Amino acid sequence: MTAGLCIESFAAVLGGILLALGIADASDALTILAMILWVSSFQPLIKVAGGTALGIRYEYAYLFGRIEPRFKTDFGSYLALSAWKRMIFHLLGTLGSPLGAALVAVIADERLRVAAWVSWAVFWIIVAINVAAFLAGLIRVSRIRGFRFADTSGGLAAVELRSAMHSVDYA
């Protein structure tokens, strides 16, 4: 876990450094690279922090042939949460990536129009994917072509919302 969190934290800090350099040098390329690092690192950092705050324990982090670590939850601690808390956990997984893109877009603003435009485009694409996955999960669409909605935080949040609504006592 420590190594995985260090990798993600390093990527977030490096993104901040590249953003500062990009702004100082008026470099769209450095600023876009910073956005990519923030989009990829903010999501797991926010989801792991939120999961920990909700009571989820983590067993380990692994690379699985990738550069970015994946964090393995202790499934028992996840299942012990109410469906509402599990839904919040998955919704937290939809916040980090768009937040990273939006922050860069706002900071780049008028100084670096290309970087700001690319960052806003990435923001809206990620938001659209998250909303589509959430809505697909609500109406029980499991996949479109090879894309499985249950593999996304938005899709899983919808599954947990359905579960929470099903378990509400209306008496």
Image: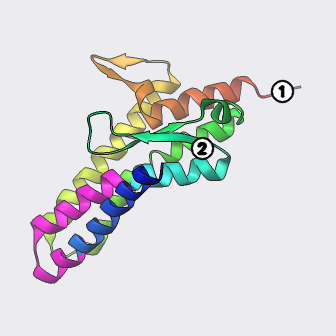
Q: Which of 29 and 124 is in front in this view?
A: 29
Q: Which residue is drawn at 27% across and 67% down?
A: 14
Query: Which numbered disc covers residue 138?
Result: none
Mark 1 crowd level (few <14, some 14–19, many ≥20, 10 Å Cα):
few
How many numbered discs, if any?
Answer: 2
Q: Residue at x 34, y 38 (%)?
A: 129
Q: Which residue is drawn at 44% across and 42% down?
A: 61
Q: Is residue 136 left or right of residue 116?
A: right
Query: Which numbered disc covers residue 170?
Result: 1
Q: In this view, does 92 lie to the left or right of 88?
A: left
Q: Position of residue 159 (x, y in %)?
A: 56, 26
Query: Which numbered disc covers residue 88?
Result: 2
Q: What residue type is labelled 2?
A: Ile
Q: Is mark 1 on a helix, strand or loop?
A: loop
Q: In which quarter of the image is the C terminus?
A: top right
Pointer 1 or 2: first along the chain:
2
Q: In this view, does 133 lie above or below 113?
A: above
Q: In this view, does 43 lie above or below 21?
A: above
| Region in magenta | 20-41
